[in-house]
Image: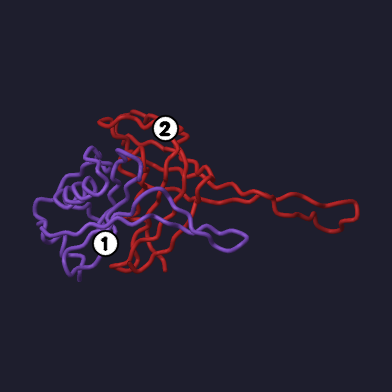
Chain colours: A purple, B red
Amino acid sequence: MDIQVELRPHIGKQPTAFGPIEVEHNQWMIFARREGGPMLHVGYVGKQPNAPINFLRQPNGQPWPEAVKEIVRQAIAEECGDGSRSEAEPPEPEDPEKSLEEDILGDED
Amino acid sequence: MADTGNGATLALATTGAIGNIRNIGEVARELGKLEDSHLGTTSNKTYIPDDLAEPGEIEVEVEFDASIELPGVGTVETVTITYPIITDGNTAANHAGTGFLTRVPTPLLANGQLQVVRVKIAFDGKTGPTFTAETTP
């Protein structure tokens, strides 16, 4: 499965007397996309060593399939030089009737 | 636009998972008021805004999971609440800042009752909290 993973710094805006200022949250926002598909926000990971990956839900509310999570984990391990990150989201039972392909392509409609 | 909370998540950058979340409470940044009424004031008490705001706390109801370690209190970490996406393809809104767990209870154990706990997290006011509205990626 060809999924491209991209890390972007998580920057928020805080109101101040001088107007909104940018605040860096010391964590990466994890984005991923299939070739030609939309870029989707799949989770967060702290910039500190061994930070757990916090996966979000898919736009349809389902957890990301384990295969996608594994690709994300590997990409982050390569990007951050850290292969020991653990899983933050508790494992949930996968729906065996729902194929991986459906999970990925189902959000592009 | 009205929406439900279904699909919202809580991310703790160091602690990680604390179990399946049933609900995430309001986060209120609150500014106090200082009474500046004096002997010449008439009709109503008068006030000025306090100098510093409270960054807020979150109460999170979680299905207790006895198969994972209890998270510790007091670890300062980035706390991120991510909202459900309103428009497909967008990046969800989020509320983030540094904070720490202040309350990690064990559940009431009873027949016919889910093991549920109410965990508390306080924003420390050092970084954020910031609210970022849903954006197009």
Q: Which residue is mark 1?
A: A40
How far is the residue under mark 2 from the one under mark 1? 32 Å
| Image mark 2: chain | B
Q: x, y percentage for residue B9?
A: 34, 50
Nearest to the observer: residue A76 or residue A92:
A76
Q: Secondary structure at mark 1?
A: strand
Asked where in the image residue A100 lies, by quadrant, the reply is bottom left
Q: Which residue is mark 2?
A: B104
Direction from residue B42 to residue A88 in the image, left or right: left
10 Å neighbourhood of mark 1: few (<14), some, or many (≥20)?
A: many
Asked where in the image residue B19 lies, by quadrant, the reply is top left
Q: x, y percentage for residue B4?
A: 37, 59
Q: x, y percentage for residue B16?
A: 32, 40
Which label number is shown at residue B9?
none
At a point 74% along the width and 49% down the height, the residue shown is B34
Nearest to the observer: residue A103 or residue B135:
B135
Give the residue type that dot 1 points to.
Answer: Leu
Asked where in the image residue A107 lies, by quadrant, the reply is bottom left
At a point 13% along the width and 61% down the height, the residue shown is A102
